[in-house]
Amino acid sequence: MSTAATAAVTVVLADDHPLFRAALKQAVLEVVPGARLVECADAASLRAAANVHESADLVLLDLMMPGSRSFAELAWLRSQYPGMAVLVVSAAESPAVLQQARAYGAAGYVPKSAPLPELVAAIRTVLEGGEWLPAAPAGAEAPAVSLASRLATLTPQQFRVLELLALGKLNKQIAAELGISEQTTKAHVSATLAKLGARNRTQATLIYRELEIREDDPLSLDR
């Protein structure tokens, strides 16, 4: 890349460990010395950064941060900002977790145990439009792919409504949270259920919970 091109690259570093963010920063700057780096330490700051830097080229995403222990942030990024590539950098090395990350739209997956040169190579590959993902068994990703495609149809407001439904919020509470009327909330709830193919709020909640990384599987844990 030319100096002008590298200076135009924006990379979001989403990890709650400052020392690991420093390692991510080092890897990115080896590939694009003039890159603009945006650091996030939790799910809320990641979403805020994505909303501000809508044209960011790449997000280096830790699956397990304060505010999220699931694929929700990956699904949200791919649904709301499909032009923003996501490279998952996670301590989880379970094939099942890797396959789900792939299904939810990750362009790459690198375990935190990988040496720096591998991380650098993955960043370079994804920034150049490629993928850094091992092959998955045929059919292994089908359920997650189906859910990812449905989530991708939700508007930002509908995605937030789904998250609030999953927290057990009533329409009145959702309206207050989003600063909209109850009538508008009802319309969003109905549209969200329809897009997900859910018959009711309970089923929508169960669908959303499919994004969770099961904590009873030690191979799926990032901490």
Image (cartoon, rainbow, N blue to C red):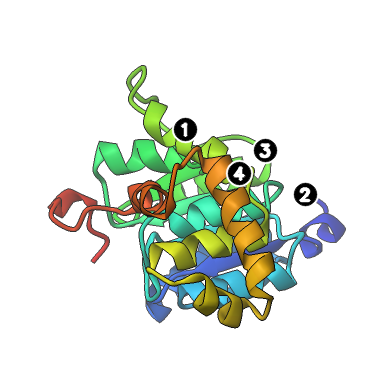
Judging from the image, what secondary structure is the residue with disc 4 in? loop
Q: Are marks 2 and 4 in contact (CB under 8 Å)?
A: no
Name the residue tied to disc 3.
Answer: 129
Q: Where does residue 174 sit, x and y in percent of width and height?
A: 54, 74
Q: Is residue 195 above or below residue 212?
A: above
* Nearer-N-terminus badge (3/4): 3
Q: Does label 1 or label 2 sit earlier along the sequence?
A: 2
Q: Residue at x 59, y 40 (%)?
A: 125
* CA separation in Å, label 3 and label 2: 13 Å
Q: CA distance from mark 3 to mark 1?
A: 21 Å
Q: Amino acid at mark 2?
A: Met
- What is the three-letter code of the residue carrying label 3? Gly
Kindly state the secondary structure of the residue where label 2 is placed. loop
In the image, is 86 to the left or to the right of 89? Answer: right
Tag 1 residue: 145
Is residue 70 at all visible to an observer of this figure? Answer: yes
What residue did someone put label 2 on?
Answer: 1
Mark 3 / mark 2, whichever is N-terminal: 2
Q: Does 47 sit above or below residue 118? A: below
Q: Secondary structure at mark 3?
A: loop
Task: From the viewer's side, name the closer residue of 118 and 178.
Answer: 178
Residue at 55% x, 56% y: name it: 76
Nearest to viewer (mark 2 / mark 4): 4
- Residue 194, located in which quarter of the rendered image? top right
Q: Which mark is residue 152?
A: 4
Q: Are marks 3 and 2 in contact (CB under 8 Å)?
A: no
